[in-house]
Amino acid sequence: MSLVRPKESLQKMKEYALKALSIDESLGEAHLVLAAVKMINDWDFPGAESEHKLALQFSPSYSTSYTWYACFMLWMGRNDEALTLIRRAQEIDPLSPALRGFLGYCLYFDRQYDKAITRIKENLTLEPNVFDSSTLGYIYLQKRMYEEAIACFKKAIDFGGGVMSEKDLACAYVFAGKPVAARNTLANLLKQSSKKYVSPDNIWQLYWALGEMDNAVAWLEKAAEERSPIVIMIYRDPQFEGVLHSHPHFIALMKKVGFEK
């Protein structure tokens, strides 16, 4: 659960990146930050790609630049390019467990589920972590292996996944035919939101899992107002295909963001 609205963080990121570039315009890391700001805050995808290219130009040996660019490619639906970029990052940093896990994430977006499972399981034996456990859970949901998904999200909670992992677990229980956990988690988050800031990311996904699409999209629109990265990520995420994509307000929101339905 975010304690700060994403829009506030993104404005600070932009401020610091521009200040750094005013001192040295060849700082690849600063261009990388601007790429994220343009994508998530401005919904300026051509501008984001230009900044990604500058980041690679000025920092060709910085593996993170390739990883972030790969994220951008995935979310733009350019999976082959994403896989090429992440493999280039692995060439630069072949011992990175994060990169091994992220290759599995790329394969998940590319619907290569069995290959993704193999990669992620290998990585989890080397370094158990929230990201890989969660991604493996999402893949199992796509394969309708609900008990396996539930086990993955429980492990993610054990690894410190917090509210996000609790939300994932509750959603998995819904798909397994046990919606009580999702109802309880949702009620708790809504109660908290009346007293303090609660990220809408988890709330809309619980409504989505429960099949309450009007409420789901209403909270997703709040996430968009706050410039949550989830708004960019979900359009091509396999788990959200289906009913959500046919909702007229979702279609309108995605067009506003810059995705054409």
Image (tube, rainbow, N blue to C red):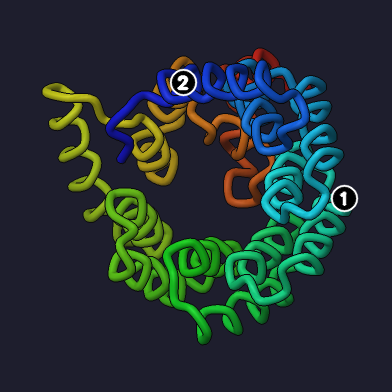
Local secondary structure at mark 1: helix
Q: In the image, what residue occupies the spot 66% across and 13% down?
A: 256
Nearest the eye: 72 or 60: 60
Position of 56 with respect to 122 (left or right) is right
Nearest the eye: 95 or 115: 95
Residue beneath disc 2: 12
Q: Residue 157: image x %, image y %? A: 30, 64
Position of 16 with respect to 222 (left or right) is right
Residue beneath disc 1: 81
Local secondary structure at mark 2: helix
Up-down relation of residue 235 to residue 152 (above or below): above
Q: In the image, what residue occupies the spot 49% across and 61% down?
A: 131
Q: In the image, what residue occupies the spot 60% across and 39% down?
A: 234
Position of 194 with respect to 155 (left or right) is left
> What is the spatial separation of the Cα atoms under label 2 and label 1, in whole angstroms?
30 Å
Q: Quadrant of the C terminus?
A: top right
Asked whether the residues under the numbered discs 2 and 1 touch, taking CB atoms below 8 Å apart as contact, a structural biologist would say: no
Instruction: Give the residue type that dot 1 points to.
Output: Glu
Q: Is residue 214 visible?
A: no
Q: Residue 66: image x %, image y %? A: 76, 50
